Image (tube, rainbow, N blue to C red):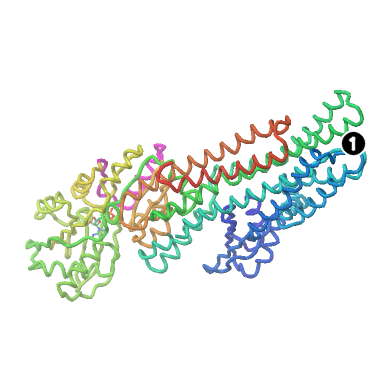
Amino acid sequence: MARIEGALLAVEGVTQARVNLITETAIVVATSPELIVDRLIRAVRHAGYDAEVGRVGVTGTTGQIQPRRLRPQRRALIQAIGLALPVVGLEHLAPALGFDGAGGYLWWRVVQAILCLVLLVSSAGGPIVIGGLRALVHRRANRDLLVSLGVTVAFVASVISLLSPNATAFHFDTAAMIVGFIVLGRYLETRARREASQAVEMLTFEATGVGGASTVGRMLRAVEQAQTGQIRMQRIADRVLEVFVPVVFVLALITFAGWCIAAEAGGAQAGQAAGRLGWALGRAVAVLVIASPCAMGLAGPAALLVAAGRAALRGILVGDAAALEAASHLNAVLLDKTGTLTTGRPEVKDIFDEPVGAITKEPREVLQWTASAEQFSQHPLARAIVARAKECNLTLQDADEFANHPGSGIQAVIDGRTVLVGSVSLMTNHQVDLSAVESRVQQMSADGQTVVLLAIDGVCAGLIGLADAVRPGASRAAERIARLGLDLALVTGDQASTAAALAASVGVKDVHARMLPEEKLAEVRRRQERGQRVAFVGDGLNEAQALTAAEVGISFVAGTDVALESADITLLGDDLTLIPEAIELARRSMRIIKQNLFWAFFYNLVAIPLAAGGKIPPGIAAAVMMCSSIGVVLNSLRLRGRKS
Ligand code: ADP
Ligand code: MG
């Protein structure tokens, strides 16, 4: 995989390349993809694989190259079985029927040779042999190389035996069985893979009701990326593979030499020696075939594909594989309040005018001034206030010289007066005297309301209380996050008492209030310095930096565009329990990948010595190898279930 990516990246104009073994796609980002497709395909071929063009220019600068769909797999399978069975059958039947005349010319060996030859050039064996040859020509080790070498050695040795009267290294049955099992394995693997990708395709489309067209596009991209990214573990496995293939080749040579020497030492007769040579060759072929590293290459991608599909079905869009990996090692989750713990659709509850300054004489006027100042703000509080003003048929005044105070409020000039709208800290910072409203602010915020204050020319002129419903599943989410062993904290720019009231209602104990955007970022950093890995959940308003700085930035799809761009995980729907669910799924995926890699390595560790020692016949070696890759795919499919 790293090899193909490297080859693609080497093509001029390519800025990014991601290869996925499971979906058999490579996504390439290039300056002018339509002009360089030919070069891209040549690069893939040069790396020892094959490819054809998928979609080009879907998202402007992204092209997708799709390696050729394996030829109708079923036909290959039928051919493989139809040709391999008679070869294997003859091997066992002919001697039993007495056709095995001592020495001389054995007609049924000729039949085997012809059938084998047809098999090797058919759509069953052809791709295997060609894939291996291509890898050899370009001196690139890939998963076809070992198998292909095994088949070729078995076949060529048998043909030589047929032509020279003394040699008896007949392995036609081995060559046939290897091809048969590989083709069967690939057929089963493709079926399992198809099942896995079907899950992905099905969510994608269910979820389209949630957002607009741009959201859908982004979602599709997210699902695609989740499958193409690579996690650290798999990168390590890939690097091991590059060394592994040559090592296996050497092991096969040693096996061959070892058995030959053993025969020599045993002082075999000339006739027997020829038989020993055949035996030694068989062991070497078994080693080549059994170690063919399909399982290792599939360990990560198979699990990631299934995980991405499962997540997408549940409304969790994982940005890439690295995000899934990061989500599995989290220690803490920091929740923003507005739009995250709450729905982000606050409603105006109370409006009070403040007679001290005597600028506003009634609540309607407070609403009008405030809404006029807020009319261009994107903040949920601003939208709620403007909406209420419209409901009350108030005409908004012209306002200019807007200034945003991120995380505390907004400033504008209306009717020649400086208007300040926002939090208590904003007012205090601008020396607005709040002594007259203090008790009222306390009272409203203890009730869980967010208080927005209005000051005109530095004098407090009124206040608006807004209430925002807590998202569904908040208490359950808090409980599950705690059970996963993670710290959970609320960080908000709002008043301490408002935050405390909301946090208490859902069972969050750690509350950080009056946090400006840079303080939210600082809180993320502080925890990271303590060695924690942090997820920040926010809607992107006033916390894009915190989202980016956190190991995992999580955002609801209804959030701002900024949030969608900086989030690693995007949640569709409203429910906060999607957060623990995403973390659980991430942990399960990593567990499955570790199992897969462990089994793939363990399998090789056990299987290679057995094959070298002559305990596994070469034909059976192919079957064992096939089971190991299918095992990896099946183990990954467990992620579709609720528990694993
Ligand atoms: P949170 O941390 O809950 O997401 P923000 O950081 O967006 O909240 O804002 C913190 C506080 O700043 C709000 O509770 C509100 O008092 C004040 N504030 C921020 N922006 C505005 C605005 N546009 N209008 C009024 N108040 C605002
Ligand atoms: Mg916010």
Mark 1, other Cα within 10 Å: few <14 / some 14–19 / many ≥20: few
Q: Is residue 20 above or below residue 278?
A: below
State the image coordinates of residue 64 (x, y, percent, origin top left). 58, 63
Give the residue drawn at x 84%, y 27%: 263
Residue 365, compared with residue 617, is above or below; it is below
Asked whether the viewer can see residue 400, the reply is yes
The residue depicted at 36 percent of the width and 65 percent of the height is 209
Q: At numbered mark 1, what does the secondary structure look like: helix, strand or loop?
A: loop
* Residue 617 within the magenta-colored segment of the rendering: no
Residue 539 shown left or right of residue 417 in the figure? right
Locate residue 484, reporting x and y percent: 36, 39
Q: From the image, tell me which residue sits under label 1.
A: 102
The answer to whether 320 appears left or right of 188 in the picture is left
> Which residues are the magenta region?
509-532
Write down the quadrant of residue 621 in the picture.
top right
Quarter occupied by the C terminus: top left
Question: What kind of residue is marked 1?
Answer: Ala
* Location of residue 633 with respect to 219 vertically, above or below: above
Which image quarter has ligand 1? bottom left
Q: Position of residue 212 (x, y in %)?
A: 38, 68
Determine if the magenta segment contains residue 513.
Answer: yes
| Residue in the foreground of this view, choosing between 174 and 65 | 174
